[in-house]
Structure formats: C-alpha cells, structure tokens
Amino acid sequence: MSAREEILARVRAAVADAPDAPPATRDYRTTHTAPERIVELLAENLADYRALVHRTDEKGLPGLIASLLADRGSATVLAPPGVPPAWLAALGPGITRIEDNPDSTARELDLVDSVVTGCALAVAETGTLVLDGSPDQGRRRVTLVPDHHICVVRVADQVVGSVPQAMPRLDPTRPLTWISGPSATSDIELDRVEGVHGPRTLEVVLVEG
Amino acid sequence: MSGTYLGMPAFPVAAKAALGNETLRGNLRHATHTIRDKRAKAVAELDDWALLREAGKQIKDHTLRHLDRYLVQLEESVTAAGGVVHWAGDAAEANRIVAELVKATGETEVVKVKSMATQEIGLNEALEAEGISAYETDLAELIVQLGDDLPSHILVPAIHRNRGEIRDIFRDRMGAWGRAAPEDLSDVPADLAEAARLHLREKFLRAKVGISGANFMVAETGTLVVVESEGNGRMCLTLPETLISVVGIEKIVPSWQDLEVFLQTLPRSSTAERMNPYTSMWTGTTDGDGPSAFHLVLVDNGRTDTLADEVGRQALRCIRCSACLNVCPVYERAGGHAYGSVYPGPIGAILSPQLRGIGSEVDASLPYASSLCGACYEVCPVAIDIPEVLVHLRERIADRGGKGHRLEKAAIKASGWVFDHPKVLAAGERAASLTRKLHPSRVPGGAAWTDSRDLPELPAAPFRDWWKKNRGEKNRGEENRGEKNDQGGKNNRGEGTAT
Ligand code: SF4
C-alpha cells in the first residue's frame, strides 16, 4: 500500500466510531467597528504597530511621495508597472525610477532604496495591508527586499473594518501578503527590534476623496 | 515520531536541573508574564472572543472527523494549482522525501523558515546526513542553531538565552556558518538583530531551495498560510526557485472563509498582537512570482494514532499559539527543555506522548508534568481541554501497570513549587476538574494524596485565585522582581513567529 493509501486508511479507521461533527456555526461578529470609525481606526492601528501614516488627497499624493523619498535621501525608487504615473510625477531630479524587471536578481533588488506600491485592501481592526500581486503591487519580493516601503491606500474603496470582511474580497489563487507594520522581532529578551529582514520602514499613505 | 531529543532525561530529572538555573528561571518568568499580560489585553479587544474560540474548535473538530475527505480535496486543489503532493507515514519517510527533492535540484544548501513539523521529524539532522546544510532563518532559531542548542518555547525558541549569551554565540559561531559577526559586536538587541540580518541576507539572496511548514492549509483552494514577524518567512517562501513545505495532516481547514477565525485568534493568542507583521498565503505556483516548483509533504508521524483516541484527539486541534505555555506554572519553573520534546509546556505534555507513544520514560512522565490548574484550557483559542487529556493519559499509563505513581511523585517533587504542599495541589486538581465538568470521585493518578481520604473541601474560587490569595506574599515578591526586569527592557510587545 502506498503511504497515501495507508494514511487515508488509518484516518478512516481512527474516526469510524467518532461522533458526528457538523460544520461550525458562525455566530461571531463580522465586524467590531462602526463604519464611520473605520478609517480613523486603521490609521491608529497602523501607527500603533510602528507604521508611519500620512493622509492626503489625489492632488497632494505626488508631492507627498516625492517629499517622503527626498526626506529619506533615496536615490532609487522601484514602482511596479501598474503604479499610476501620476504618483511619481513630482520626483526630484536626484531620484531614479526603476522598473520591476522579472529578470532582475534579488541581489539587484537589494540595491534599491525605496519601493512604492498600491494594495488590494486594508483592514482597520488589525492595522493590516493586503497585497495580492496586482500590477500596481508587483511581485512579492519587491515589497520585501528593499528597506523602505511606501504603500498607497485608496480610502474610498480599499478599507474594510475586519478580517471577516476582507476574506470574500480576496482571491486565494493570487499570492497574498498581509503586512501589519514593519518587520519586527522580539526574540532577544522580548525587546522589540524593527527590520530584521523585511523593510525597516513602512509608510502608509491614506488617499481620501 | 522520531526520538528527536535523544538522551533526554524524563521530565522529573530535567525539571529538577532546570530549577537550579537562576538565569533560565528569571528569563522565563519575565517572558511568560510579559506575553500573558499583553495577550489578555489583545483578547479583550474582541467582545466575541468566546464565539470565535467555539467556532475555531468546531472547525477543527469537523475537519478531523472528515480528515480523509479534506486531505483528498487538498491534494486535488494543490495539484490543480501547480504543486506536487507527497505523503509521509512517519518521520523517516518524510525526511527521505525531502532529501530526495533537494538532491534533485542539485543544491546542497537550503534556507528554512521555522517549522515545528520539521523539528519534530528531525529534518535538519537527516539532511545533514545526506550532505545538505539546512539554515534556520528565524532569529531565535538561528540563535539555537548556532549555539548547538535546543529550542525551549514554541514561539520564542531562544527564550532561555539572554542578550550577553546571544552576543557570545554570534561572535564565536557565525563565522563558521557564513558571514561572521563584527568583532566588536555589542549586546544591544538592535545590533544583534543587524548582525543576524547581514549574516542571513547573504543566504537568502543565493538560496535556490526553501523549506517551510505551514500554519494552515485550505482544502477548498489549496492555499497554504505562514504567519510570521521578521520577514525571514517571506524570504524563504518567495526568493528560492523550489519551495518544499512539510506539514502535519491536521493543519487543514476546509474553507477559505475558515481562515477568518484563526487569523483573529492566532496572533492575539500567540504574540498578543492584533495581527502579526507578515502573513504569506500561496496557492501552488504563480508565473513570474515566487518559486516555480512547489512540493507539499503531508506528514502523519503519529497523528492518525492520536486521532484514534477519543479523548486525546482534541490535541490535534492545536494551532501552536503557545498561550498555554505562558500561563503554565510548571512550564514557568521547569523551562521548555525539561519536556524532552519539540512541543513543550501543557500542549507538549499531551501531544508528545500521543505522537510518540508512552513507551519511553520521558513520554510516560509528561502527563504528570502539570498541576492540572486549568489555566491552559482557559487560554486555549481552540478550547483543548488539556487537563482532561492529561488525566486520561495518566489513566492509560496507570492501566499499563506502569510507574505512574512513582513518576508523579518525582515530577511533583522536581517541580518544587505548589507541590511542596499536597493540599494545595489537591484543591487545584479538584477545582480544575470541576471547571471541566469532570467529576471524578478521586482524581485519577492523584492517588499519592487522595488514596486514604476524601478530597478536601472544594474551594469557592478558581485555583489560581486561591493561590494568589493564600500564597500572596511569595507571589508579590516574584512579581516585583518581574517588574524590575520589565523596566530594563523597553517596548516589550512579544513578537515572534508562530509557525
Ligand atoms: S494547546 Fe491551545 S493554547 Fe496551547 S499551543 Fe495549542 S492552541 Fe495554543
């Protein structure tokens, strides 16, 4: 008998006399947050987990992104191909935009200073951004290897209150990355240290209007 | 289950040794108290916690009852998404499959994201025997691996090491494994983390094969989920060309929607966070993003035996959050190594003897490594009645005509705590069993003190309240020392990986 058949046979024998166990009842809440509180809560929870939160509107976005990059002294910024050109329209002359080239190596990506992406959605109650690899978010590694990530959230249609509200809006066939604050560890005497492997700095821009 | 912790003494002996180690006990007390207090706050934010806990329990019970069906469905969905599924009956078979998969790539190095399942089967050692180096990339696992040590906690495996020891391990050992630590490395956590970042980045950027476990597998979609904090998981899951995930067969959830329950309960129970910094979900392979080859190795290794035990099977609901470790008075005293198993603490005391069988001294002693105070059951996000299973396993050991009696006395003596006072223990056992709606006239296995007399009056308050009140003075002393420790460390939030 193959291992597969053997394991399945053992499972069947093990539960043969077990009582019925029906599917779960889902009487937990679908959200804990009133709709009018959602955006404030998202901003609070992101900040609580050490993301830097900025708020602007469509018009202010290019200027804000340009100044965030300039303040950090970034010389190179990577933006996946689906990022609207307007987002990076105000970059100063000292900053070079790099394309997300499928043939580039992780080592080349390691030399990039900053990355700018959109997101699939944001979850207020947990302070979480979810990326699904859409053209404005790029492959998973672009938001991982560089040390600085600026993520743009469209408040009007991308913010949900809770995890149960997020699930039906996500497509499991895509690779999904849930990001809640910058990379962190507390493995040394439980002292929190940011940026072990993922970006040390996560900046979130909430775009209203 | 393979005898991973070879040569480990039984719990009583190991616990006694740990009790003599002041550093270990100080670190443990500080860590467990910090995490448990924060956890309580994170849980209190959700007023439907009890309902989420019940749903989590029901989802897992339903899955286990129909595990054959969901395993087959998972295999279909993973295969349809471009993955390859392998089945391993035991540790040796799983290790052989992984070694062959690695060899087929022509590589001799792999990067690993922390995984309890691969620790359980002794994968690193098995790969080493085949000439393959497996690099652990979780910071705590790196500390353990470089220190030639064993993990002592599910979530923070190097909890028993302080910053000075970590600095020494990095300075002395990193060079032999890759990029050396700077000569003048300080013991400041940020500097230590930076040394690890540089050391590991070298490995991530050249790795061709990654090995992971998984927190969840979704039967309906074929999606695997890894929950972590540092980003080492994301590195291992996305940069290599080949990804091999080694996962216990009990980690299935039926539907995509089921994740909404566990993504709320796991981080809050585990690191006391609303959400851990990174969660990766992948379904087979994706063109142009991440590994081009994905292998899933489904591991039994004692799980079907556990499933066959009608009381003990609930241990398979465990989502490895480690909350039960942090509230356990015995774990706090004895430390993780005393359990002689990759699964320490209350869950280890019921899971390890079931996965491995109760044949060895260490496994037969584990069900006695508990005061039955019930705190582990109260915090468990999938409501595993650990005390019930402990009592049940004690019965099994006693039925064998075994040495339950002797083991129990030894375990209790070695833990040297509440156990110096038989009445306290008896009250605790009784209170605990009532909480569980378990009404033995005598506590099974508790015969040492209850043989010749009835149990003492039932205390009105739960055991831990009773303990606080009656032993308050000693307790306060301990808490004060704990506070001093707290002030020394800023920003404690207890992050870690929870794979
Ligand atoms: S037994 Fe429960 S509390 Fe303990 S690690 Fe497992 S899920 Fe967490």
Image (cartoon, coloured by chain):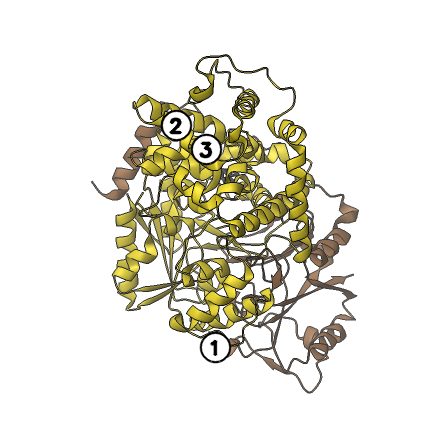
Chain colours: A brown, B yellow
**First in sequence: mark 3 vs mark 2:** 2
- Dot 1 surroundings within 10 Å: few (below 14), some, or many (20 or more)? some
Residue of label 1: A107
Location of residue A115 by image quarter: bottom right
Residue of label 2: B393
Kindly report the distance in space between the C-alpha atoms of the residues bearing marks 1 and 3: 56 Å
Residue B266 at x, y = what percent? 56, 44
Q: Residue at x 48, y 42 (%)?
A: B334
Instruction: Out of B175 and B382, give the one closest to the viewer.
Output: B175
Residue A89 at x, y = what percent? 70, 78
Instruction: Please tell me whether mark 3 sits on a helix, a strand or a loop.
Output: helix
Q: Amino acid at mark 3?
A: Lys
Q: Report if residue B127 is visible in the image.
A: yes
Instruction: Out of B25 and A36, give the one closest to the viewer.
Output: B25
Q: Quadrant of the N terminus of chain B?
A: top left
Question: Would you say B38 lies left or right of B335 here?
Answer: right
Q: Residue at x 43, y 36 (%)?
A: B349
The mark closer to the camera, 1 or 3, is 3
Q: Chain of mark 2?
A: B
Kindly report the distance in space between the C-alpha atoms of the residues bearing marks 1 and 2: 53 Å
Q: Report if residue A162 is visible in the image.
A: no
Kindly report the distance in space between the C-alpha atoms of the residues bearing marks 3 and 2: 20 Å
Residue B4 at x, y = what percent? 33, 48
As displayed, is residue A107 above or below residue B95? below
Question: Would you say B284 lies left or right of B155 here?
Answer: left
> Mark 1 near mark 2, Cβ–Cβ under 8 Å?
no
> Mark 3 near mark 2, Cβ–Cβ under 8 Å?
no
Q: Amino acid at mark 1?
A: Arg
Q: Amino acid at mark 2?
A: Leu
> Mark 1 near mark 3, Cβ–Cβ under 8 Å?
no
Q: Chain of mark 3?
A: B
